[in-house]
Image (cartoon, rainbow, N blue to C red):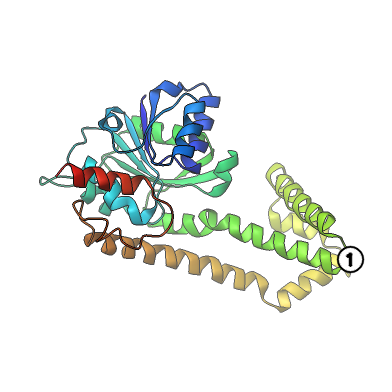
Amino acid sequence: MKISFIGGGNMTQAILGGLIASGYAAHDCFVVEPMEAARAKLASHGVAASEAWDRRALEADVILLAVKPQMMRIAVAPMAGALGAQLVISIAAGIRTGDLSKWLGDVKGGYERIVRAMPNTPALVHAGITGLYAMPLVAASQKTSAEALLAAVGKTFWCDDENMLDAVTAVSGSGPAYVFYFIEALEAAALELGFDADAARLFALETFAGSSKLARMSADSPATLRANVTSKRGTTERAIEAFDHAQLKSKFIDGVKAAALRSAELGKELGRAAIDIQPGDTKEGTMKGAEHRVGAGDKLADHKMESK
């Protein structure tokens, strides 16, 4: 199986690292990535990379799109109408398969061999979880390929309904931020209780790491594990009472639901915004004022403009 990556940033490098560590051949991978430092990292693993769009990207069995969501429309422009039966995997948050299908299609219709994936940042240390959704025309063998790719950086889970990816985004996509938020809070509490900074960080991190490991290894539910620590009239009970008085759990659930709602809103916004972005637009037009570093999408746009 040959794989092309459009965008060679951290997530692409994590996936490639996982694949190569499991025995996958680096020479079967190709990356379009404009940043020299990223290409140098890829080269150190034996992976060929191009600064700008290269038709070698189309010679793959699987094309993984790893560019910023706001750049996706321009990034895929050179591929529009040029695909055969390749599997296209998008890991761009919020980009719906219906929109991507239209951008990749031709005058006869959209391209429908697309899998949408939502990994999370622990994938960078091969400890992530990815939600996956496949359009109906994706073959069973292609679903297997998609799962194998994302399994290189953690666990995978298939969703039958694409709308569930908004929930995946809210729970696991944004989830690491919630965990870091609570680690921050526990660390802050430790500081106020007299720990020095290093000790506060150590106790907060090890408490979360150990508790997570215990929850994974135990047959008991998290609720039971919590109850096991909560002695009657003890210190933990006093803390839980304070949390419940502040309605911490219900407020937390409200926050996760708000994230899911925002994910759905962003999907619609990205689809609408892309209507105004055409492959032949100039940098002085749609690209003017773009934030962040120059990405694969910018280089693909350059290629498209030069080819006109």
| Residue 280 seen in render | yes
Tell me if residue 109 comes above or below residue 192 in the rendering: above
In the image, residue 109 lies at what x, y percent? 14, 47
- Going by the numbered disc 1, the residue's amino acid type is Gly
Q: Nearer the viewer, residue 231 or 21?
A: 21
Q: Position of residue 214 (x, y in %)?
A: 74, 46
Residue, x 77% and y 69% (percent of image)?
240
Quarter the C terminus occupies: top left
**Residue at horizontal 74%, vertical 56%?**
224
Where is residue 298? Give x, y as percent.
32, 49
For residue 246, which quarter of the picture? bottom right
Residue at the outermost bottom position: 245
The answer to whether residue 158 is left or right of residue 210 is: left
State the residue at coordinates (72%, 45%). Answer: 213
| Quadrant assignment, res 27 | top left
Location of mark 1 (residue): 194
- Horizontal and vertical percent for residue 90? 37, 45
Q: Is residue 95 visible?
A: no
Which corner quadrant holds the N terminus? top left
The quarter holding residue 184 reads bottom right
Label 1 Cα neighbours within 10 Å, binned few <14 / some 14-19 / many ≥20: few
